[in-house]
Image (tube, rainbow, N blue to C red):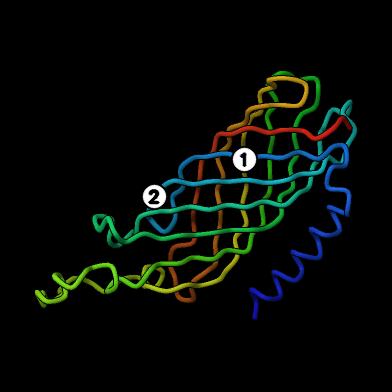
Amino acid sequence: MRAARFLFVLTSAITTVFPAQAQAPGVELQAGLGYARVFDGGGISFAAGVERQLSSPASAWQHALGASLWYAHTTIGSAPNISSLRRDITGIGMRYQLGLGPCCRPVRPFLAIPVQLLLSNIPDRTSLMGASLLAAEIPDTGPPSPVEDLAGSEWGWGAGLELGVRVGLGSNLSAHTSVQSLYQDIYAGSTRHGAWNWHAGLTYQLGTP
């Protein structure tokens, strides 16, 4: 229920920020690849987003608000050596960004605050082990897996801080790199709530504000 309420509020907010004219001036498209660390497991990460500028291009401080998408494919913290077992975590949400204006071109640092609805999924381990391993009947004498490392899907939410820099490559194109630290609340009873990711990518501005 909490995930459904969060998704309703999030959808309403995105609709308010981005009315019908998706190609309106001051809208930016972003995409990047990198690395994520989630529940003590690490792997490839992808991030994308669309942002609308809330301040004029000449302002000393640049404000923007938009929608974001995050996906990561990571190892499992309690079973890092099982190559066939991985976690897929997907986040969709909103992101507020504050950056320096024209005074710092071509390199402009920025600070962002993301809030996301998260879905963590781990496939059923028995379906991945294969019949040969199951037939061996090797007893599992190790400690029980943490609740966040059990097979299945679970919804939750996350929020954090992101620090990065943008480098201008042209009138409408820039490169960016950033590190994001995230607090996540997905599994009831979990003792691990921290995650972080690093991305590098490109930003393209639609039109001229």
The image's mark for residue 124 is none
| Residue 33 percent location from the top left of the image | 52, 40
Query: Crowding at label 2, few (<14), some or many (≥20) Cα neighbours within 10 Å?
Result: many
Mark 1 or mark 2, whichever is nearer to me:
1
**Is 60 on the left-hand or right-hand side of 4?**
right
| Residue 92 percent location from the top left of the image | 64, 58
In this rendering, the answer to whether 96 lies above or below 141 is: above
Task: Name the residue that disc number 2 marks.
Answer: 42
Residue at figure coordinates x 52%, y 69% from the top left: 186
| Residue 182 percent location from the top left of the image | 56, 53
- Which of the two labelled residues, at mark 1 and mark 2, occupies the earlier sequence position? 1
Q: Nearer the viewer, residue 131 or 62?
A: 131
Q: Nearer the viewer, residue 202 or 111?
A: 202
Which secondary structure, mark 1? strand
User: Marks 1/2: CA distance?
Assistant: 20 Å
In this rendering, the answer to whether 71 lies above or below 188 is: above
**Is 139 on the left-hand or right-hand side of 70?**
left
Check disc 2 and give the amino acid type.
Gly
| Residue 53 percent location from the top left of the image | 83, 40
Check disc 1 and give the amino acid type.
Ala
The image's mark for residue 31 is 1
Residue at figure coordinates x 55%, y 48% from the top left: 181
